[in-house]
Image: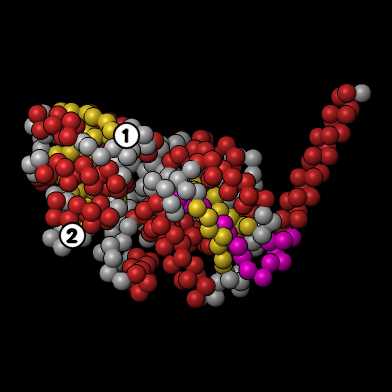
Amino acid sequence: MRRFETRRKLLLLGAVGALTAAVVGDALAQASDIKIAGMTFLTGRFSSFGVDVEKGVKLALDKINAKGGVLGKKLVIDLHDTASDSAQAVTLLRRFASSSDVVGIIGPTGTPDLLATMPVAAQLNVPMVTIGSLKPLAKNEFSDGVFRVALMNTPEVVRDIIKKVAESRKIQRVALFMDRTNDAQQADAATARAAIKLGAGVELVTDESFAGGDKDFSVLIGKMTQAKADALWLSGTTNEAAVIISQARARGFKGVVMGGAGMTDPKIVQLTGAAAAPYVMFTPLNLQSENAAVKDFVAAYRKAHGDAQISTFVAYGYDAVMLLEDAIRRAGKPDRSAVRQALGTTKDFKGVTGEYSFDGKGDNVKPVPYIMEVGPQGTFVSFK
């Protein structure tokens, strides 16, 4: 009797799930607009990245809708703030998935929010294009329907970058500072260490950590000076990075500051001013590219925001929306399952941050990094 009751409940749950999917599908098909949802940190510790994502999202929507939308309908977004709180990201994901008119999700931004939402995404049938996370994940670690827009760095890629910079600037001894409270920066530092061990042509002479929110880095800088480092690999983000650079320059450090995705924020240069250079980072964004997608993006940004420096995260937000729009168009209907399938078969999509191809889920299978440096005018230019 108990077995029969359990089987009856399972059949009932299956029927409810099928009915829910059918209701969602009908709502999506009948809506006057095609709606996506989005979440990023617009306030809190990492808000500078989230605000840039929002700018990119808006630029993409303006471009799409100026050309008639997608499938003959206007593409709109319901964008919310996670407030740099992973629990809030999970709450938003559940809310979006339960909304019958949401066909896909942009975000969350960053590693902590991705890791928090991934188990929940596994239970939901809604495609999610997450932005900016740097934690290495194998394809099978991604939930179905989850895709990532970010430049994933391998030790081999970072080795070649460090080697090129070291040969050009005669670097021999490197210090490493890492934000131990940030998963993405821990991953960034681990990659840099592995890259040096693979043969980047430099020696790691001191390896130190700090906590997000720290303001006094004199002890770390003292260790770097004592170790006679002529370059600093900085695995950090905007606020702490700017303070570290300013304090290190004030203490007489003249070496090259290097870093990955966390160091691509032009606000670091704005905050440090003349103290920034020499400063080298690598990014998927080459604003001097002849790629039509990049040229259109830069022109749209200049029209909306003037001559302000363009952050990689603006481009990430832009590409995330454009990838989802492309999938909706190829799916031929605003249906979650069809859009998820279309995203998984994306091939050679020419975005602003590179050419994207996905193999079912997860990461872009063909990322390309560009080495950039701070030029005389305080802007990022191609490394020479």
> From the image, which quarter does the N terminus lie in?
top right
Q: Which residue is mark 2?
A: 378
Q: Position of residue 131 (x, y in %)?
A: 44, 50
Residue pictured at 27% horizontal, 43% vertical: 240
Q: Amino acid at mark 1?
A: Ala
Looking at the image, the residue that sits furthest to the top is 2
Q: Identify the mark at residue 211; answer none if there is no mark.
A: 1
Looking at the image, the residue that sits furthest to the front is 215
Q: In this orientation, which residue lies closer to the viewer: 108 or 6?
A: 108
> From the image, which quarter does the C terminus lie in?
bottom left
Which region is colored magenta? 26-41
Q: In this orientation, which residue lies closer to the viewer: 252 or 191?
A: 252
Q: Is residue 39 magenta?
A: yes
CA separation in Å, label 1 and label 2: 28 Å
Of discs 1 and 2, which sits in the foreground?
1
Q: Position of residue 280 (x, y in %)?
A: 20, 48
Looking at the image, the residue that sits furthest to the right is 1
Q: Position of residue 225 (x, y in %)?
A: 10, 33
